[in-house]
C-alpha cells in the first residue's frame, strides 16, 4: 500500500498528512484490503447509461449535492439512509459498484482519467459543483485536522501555504478547476451541469429546479420545496451525522457538517494572507473563465 506522509515542503513546517500516493497522485487512505489494486482497475469498470456522476474538488458541497440529486432521482423527499461515502468511486471495489442499484448517483474527487472509461463512452451525466477556494481552504483545513486518518494537527498559517501548493489529497484546487474547464471546452457536447456552492446558498430552490431540468426529473414545486427543506444545513447536520463512524473523528466529534456558510474565510484569513491569495489566484486563473464569488 503506497501510504505516505505528505509534507508541505514549506520551511519550518514539519507537519504531514497521512495519505496514499498512486504514482504521484495523492488520494486519502481508504481502509480496505487491496485498495490500490481496486483503484487502479477503475478505468475498466462497467458503467450504466443512467449513472450520474458528481465531480468536485473536496469541500465544494459534494454531500449537499449528493443528497439533493439522490432525492431527485428517487422522486421522493425522503432522507437518504446511506452516507455519501458509500457511493464515492475512489473508495469502492468493482463488486460494490456493480451491486449498487440504479440509478446510481456516485461521487468523486478524482480526475476523469482514473474513472471508468465507460462513463464517457456512455455519456453519463456529470454534475460539477464549484466553490470559492478561500472557503474550500478553511473547510479542508478543518477536515484534515478533524479526521484522524490524516494524523494532521498543523497551524492554519502553514496549512494555507500547503493548500495553495496543492500538497493535499487530490492536489491543487487551481489545477483541478483548470482541468475541468479544459474538459468542458474540449467536450462541448458532453452533458455536464455546473453548479456553484454560492448560488446554492443564495437560492437553493432555483438551483434544485435547474438540476431537476438537467436530470430530466419532473419535480413539482412541492417536491422541490420538500427536498430543499430536508437538505438545509442544520437538518442534514442533525440527521446525517448519525451515519458517521465517530471513531474516525477527533474527540469522537464528526465534522463533515461544520458551518455551511459562504465567506467564513473572512474569520480565518489575515489581510496579508488574503492579499497573497488574491494575487496567486489572479495569476493562476488569468486564462480561466471560471467566475467564483468569494461572498454573496
Ligand atoms: P464548511 O466546512 O465550510 O462548513 P463536501 O461535502 O464537498 O465535503 O463539502 C463540505 C462542505 O459543505 C462543508 O463546508 C459543509 O459544512 C458544507 N455543507 C454540507 N452540507 C451542507 C448543506 N446542506 N448546506 C450548506 N453547506 C453544506
Image: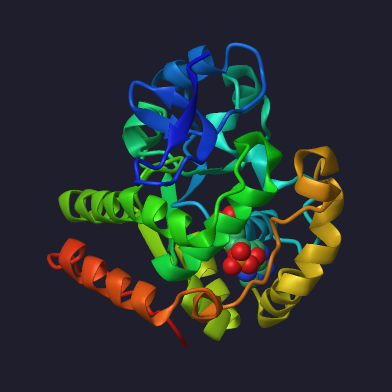
- Answer with left or right where residue 256 lies relative to residue 92: right
Looking at the picture, tell me which residue is in the foreground, 222 or 80: 80
- Answer with left or right where residue 20 lies relative to residue 232: left
Residue 85 % position (x, y)? 66, 41
Can see residue 132?
no
Within the displayed image, which quadrant is ligand 1 positioned in?
A: bottom right
Task: Write the residue at 67% across / 71% down.
Answer: 259
Residue 63 % position (x, y)? 63, 56
The type of colouring in the image is rainbow
Q: Is residue 26 above or below residue 272?
A: above
- Answer with left or right where residue 114 lies relative to residue 14: left
- Answer with left or right where residue 60 lies relative to residue 105: left
Residue extending furthest toward the front: 12
Task: Write the residue at 67% across / 31% down.
Answer: 100
Q: Is residue 215 above or below residue 110?
A: below
Question: Total marks drawn?
Answer: 0
Residue extending furthest toward the left: 287
Q: Is residue 123 above or below residue 173?
A: above
Task: Write the residue at 45% across / 16% down.
Answer: 41
Task: Write the residue at 83% across / 38% down.
Answer: 247
Q: Dividing the picture into quarters, in which one does residue 294 lie?
A: bottom left
Residue 128 % position (x, y)? 42, 57
Residue 113 % position (x, y)? 32, 32
Looking at the picture, tell me which residue is in the foreground, 226 or 41: 41
Looking at the picture, tell me which residue is in the foreground, 150 or 86: 150
Q: Is residue 150 above or below residue 11?
A: above
Can see residue 113?
yes
Looking at the picture, tell me which residue is in the foreground, 237 or 46: 237
Amino acid at each position: 500500500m503506497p501510504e505516505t506522509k505528505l509534507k508541505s515542503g514549506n520551511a519550518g513546517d514539519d507537519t504531514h498528512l497521512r495519505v496514499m500516493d498512486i504514482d504521484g497522485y495523492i488520494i486519502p487512505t481508504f481502509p480496505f484490503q487491496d485498495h490500490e489494486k481496486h483503484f487502479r482497475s477503475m478505468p475498466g469498470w462497467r458503467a450504466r447509461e443512467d449513472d450520474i456522476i458528481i465531480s468536485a474538488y473536496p469541500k465544494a458541497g459534494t454531500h449537499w449535492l449528493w443528497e439533493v440529486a439522490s432525492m431527485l432521482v428517487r422522486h421522493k423527499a425522503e432522507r437518504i439512509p446511506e452516507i455519501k461515502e458509500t457511493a464515492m468511486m475512489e473508495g469502492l471495489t468493482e463488486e460494490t459498484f456493480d451491486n449498487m442499484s440504479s440509478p446510481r448517483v456516485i461521487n468523486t474527487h478524482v480526475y476523469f482519467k482514473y474513472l471508468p472509461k465507460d462513463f464517457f463512452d456512455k455519456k453519463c451525466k456529470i454534475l460539477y459543483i464549484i466553490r470559492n477556494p478561500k472557503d474550500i481552504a478553511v473547510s479542508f483545513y478543518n477536515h484534515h485536522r478533524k479526521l484522524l486518518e490524516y494524523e494532521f494537527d498543523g497551524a492554519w498559517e502553514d496549512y494555507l501555504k500547503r493548500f495553495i501548493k496543492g500538497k493535499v489529497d487530490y492536489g491543487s484546487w487551481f489545477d483541478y478547476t483548470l482541468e475541468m474547464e479544459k474538459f468542458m471546452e474540449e467536450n462541448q457536447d458532453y452533458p455536464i451541469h455546473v453548479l456553484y456552492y454560492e448560488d446554492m446558498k443564495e437560492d437553493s430552490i432555483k438551483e434544485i429546479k435547474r438540476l431537476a431540468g438537467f436530470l430530466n426529473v419532473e419535480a413539482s414545486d412541492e417536491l422541490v420545496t420538500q427536498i430543499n427543506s430536508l437538505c438545509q444545513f442544520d437538518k442534514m447536520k442533525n440527521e446525517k451525522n448519525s451515519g458517521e463512524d465517530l471513531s474516525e473523528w477527533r474527540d469522537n466529534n464528526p465534522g463533515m457538517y461544520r458551518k455551511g456558510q459562504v465567506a467564513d474565510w473572512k474569520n480565518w484569513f489575515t489581510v496579508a494572507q488574503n492579499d497573497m491569495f488574491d494575487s496567486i489566484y489572479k495569476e493562476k486563473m488569468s486564462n480561466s473563465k471560471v467566475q467564483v464569488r468569494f461572498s454573496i
